[in-house]
Image: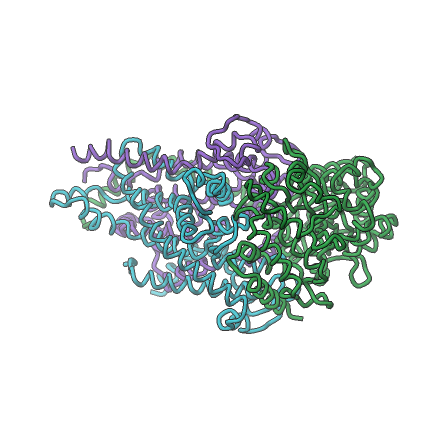
Chain colours: A cyan, B purple, C green
Amino acid sequence: MKRKKKKVNLTHLVFIAPHMIIFIVFIVIPIFFGIYVSFTKWDLIGTPQWVGLDNYKEILFNTKSTFNRQFFDGLKNTVLFVIFNVPLCIVVPLAFALVLHIRPLGSKIYQSVLYLPTLFSITSVGLIWIQLLNRRFGLASVMGAKVQWAITMPYAWIALMIMTVWWTMGSNMVIYQAALGSVPKEEYEAAEMDGAGWFTKLVKITIPSIRFQLLYTLVITIAGSFNVYGQPTIMTRVDLGAGPKINVLVQYIRSIAFGSGQSAAGIASAMAVILGLFITIVSIIQFKMIRSED
Amino acid sequence: MKKGFLKRLIAPAILGVICLIWILPIAYGVLSSFKSEVEIKDTRFHFIPETWTLDNYKYILENSGNTPIIKWFMNSFLIAVITSVGVALIISLAAYGYTRIKWEYRDQVFYIVLALSFFPQIINIIPLYKIVDTLGWVNKMPAAIVPALASVTNLFLVRQFMLGIPIEFDEAARIDGANDFMIYSRVIMPMLKPVMTVVILFTFTGQWNDLLWPSIVFNDVQKMPLTPGLQLLMGAYGNFNTAPVITAAMISIVPTFILYLFTQKYFLQSLSLSSGVKG
Amino acid sequence: MYYDDNIINRYKYNVLNNEKEKIMKKRMGKIVSSLLTCTMALGLMACGSSDKSGDTSASTSSSGGKKIEFWNFFTGPDGNNMKKLIDDFNKTNPKYKINNITMAAGDMYQKIPTVVNSGKGVPDLCIVDVARVPMFQSQGILEPMDEILTREPEIKRENYREAVWNTGAIDGKQYSVPLDMGVTGLLYNKKLVEKYAPNVLDDNVVTVDEIMDIIPKAKADDIVTLPVSFFTYEMALSLATQKGGSLFNEDGITPNLNSAELKEAYQTLRDIQEAGGGSEDGDDNLQLFINNMSIFCHTGVWDYNSLMQAEDLDWGMTNTIAYSPDKIVNVSNSNQFVLLKSEARTEEKEIVIADFLDFIRENTMEWARSGQVPASNSADGEQEFQHMPGYFFVSSPEEQNSIAFRSFKYGGIVDDAIFASQNDAIYGSMSVDDFLNQAQQQSEDNIAQQGE
């Protein structure tokens, strides 16, 4: 009996070791370093100075502090972004994937077009959209925009959502397409023989069959949305004008860590750690709610 | 009949309209790359160029000592390809370990790995640079390749697909005397062609477009990949030359788009499960 | 559903019938393993070679030969001028050639702590903005320029503009050598000035009152008078300095952003905006000026090349707007050469660096062509420079004295705090008081984070 157990232990290690080693060296160590920094005052140059929980207290409880203001403003905008973005980025690509799955005429072209934006880097996307959104000479002017969309509420949110979905939905769509391909046709045929309509088929067969991938897109899209940085940065460029900006948390964190002046890396790290914990808790809730791990 | 109608007319029509709107920003970008700088900056809106010019392309594609664009392309290509292959291998191996083998704490370990990967990676570059430098990889390709091999999102993705493969396949193979590695390579992996294609596509694109890390890690103009190279060429945003920047963006997506077209059919393939075999 | 034998048969069927796939997999396997081996080999080679050389700083780069790594952010048209200077210097066959590494300023300032922390990959010579010099010096990452100054005695205060030279003098040592002065001033459109304010430039400065007079006339024709959202900071600082205000207290450390002078300055700019003199929110202000839609525009000398490229534009540059012609202040940036602390910088390299800096000093006319006002005065006698708009700012002692630099230990923190909501105050979505109070709070909080 003992010999059998030993054999099983070793095998799994062989499989997960290459990934685990790289993961620990290049991801875990820097993260733990970041956690350490969150308990210090550090300007990224000298030696970090231990301050215990001071950074956390200042961010979370000192209502007069700039960092408190920035943290909660950033968190608010981030959460709003997640709430608006995630449903769109789950449902829209799924809808497209389902339609494309029945192979309508020209589907190859359509899916290429739909996927194309994802191939662009964020800087390229930003460049194009800034031009388009400009009230004076962008597309927005042609469409008769009376205000600068990028900086007027609620248009700013609408513009941000459109740009984000346009840019990112391709990835989820591709995953759904791959997932749909692996649903056995026999199940559909069996259901059709039982007289099921398209809606029943969708809900009773398709969705459950791709539930693993749905969970994936849900978790990853949420985590990604919490970590969003590129799109809001584009939309909050100073030369787009004054007015309420959508500043998400990661933007604040970066500006605190890499601003024009001395870095307050301790505060930035603490904010990052809090955000990380937040995402983790949200993910745990998701897993528990969906319980797809049979 | 009904389905045929949908397939041939309604769906394509709706999709067609959506796609036309969808491609507008990109069309604008492509057309802008043929415009002169003056035209882009003009206060009136131009969609189609009044005067078509190839100047922007000439400017970027000019291969010089200080801007060796061909070298940049090659560097990016190498990095992206090696990473993609590496990720496909390492991640699929790990996913197998997390799904097909039972071991104590297996799921907990996976969840911890997943949770850690969600942490915002901002201050990361400081210790990461130090680690990379200790390994002697500054200005060298491994710096851009190896950290990317730890991709947890891909691990999660492959794991999810693997979970959808019934365990009976494993058991049938075990009855035939296959060990874990043989099950992995001959049973599971062939079934994962669609998702592995997706993984390769995503990894290639991600590496190709990565800007921050390569610009930190590469100083040498000859060694750097395309993204920091183009940054060098372009300069900061603002008042200087928007046209070349847009042109550079257009040029950059060509390889990734070709890869996408190439791999399209692979991830749309149905699993061998339902490939018309009469059971 | 899957518990039937058919599945097992299907599996066997697949395994047996996918011979093609097997062969492909084998081939893939071979490719994969050889790629892996290559990668590992690369990695090993990389580790190996770096151990041998020991000097992993970037100074022995791919093209072989000895190099001096020079980081700068001249990625715009001025990059060509710097490149020419470097090429010309390299032609004189120095022991080490200068390797020109340009990158966006933001990237560079993110890279500097990264390389300084690890100690490797630090550039031998670096350009930084003057605003950062006191910060870097206080963080201990700058080496004093003593060796350089001894080696090349011509690099001295007398050969440069005094004010900008002094920005590098901290605690009795010289920590930087200035390259130029990026002076900000008022661009004016000659035709529009003729039309709306014919004599306003007689005293070489446009006063605030004069601006307010012009506004109604220009506004009637839909012409912008002065876009206040462009380089607002510099304008506001100029106005505040004119009245004796300053960003920091006497100690240079405590921020003083909600001072009366600064509040008045921003209020003045806001008044101009509200009277209709400014551009609309989100406009590209330089483009407005280039397209003859704005009488004035406040910007820096570095826009020279963009302006020269404009067709149909007759322009000039003069002092920043002022409350009265008696007190003129032109806020200026400055690019400065610094030596970041680096073990890889040998004495031999320092000698070449000194020669290079002296070369720049003497040939500064080339840099003047970029539009910046050179810090060295070696080009002052040249006709070519005298015809350039930047020359205006050094044409007399009064002009030279009007140039003000921002060079404070916590200057960067204050800059960020101001930029956070500056535009909001100008366009009225936030009151000037609130804006400056918030900026003050932000500065104090960030400075408090800096410990001792």
Q: Nearer the viewer, residue B75 or C249?
A: C249
Residue C377 placement (x, y as % from top left): 83, 45
Nearest the eye: C365 or C434:
C434
Q: Which residue is drawn at 81% across and 60% down?
A: C173
Up the image or down, A159 lies above or below B62; here it is below
Q: Which residue lies furthest to the left in this view?
A: A194
Q: With A105 as the anchor, is C253 left or right in this view? A: right
Quarter residue B196 falls in: top left
Numbered-mark total? 0
Residue sitting at 54 percent across and 51 percent down? A238
Quadrant containing the C terminus of chain C is bottom right
Residue C236 as seen in the image, left or right of residue B179: right
Q: Give the x, y percent position of residue C265.
A: 64, 58
- Is residue B201 among the parts visible in the rendering? no
Give x and y (percent) for residue C41: 57, 44
Q: Give the side of residue C183 with respect to residue A202, left or right.
A: right
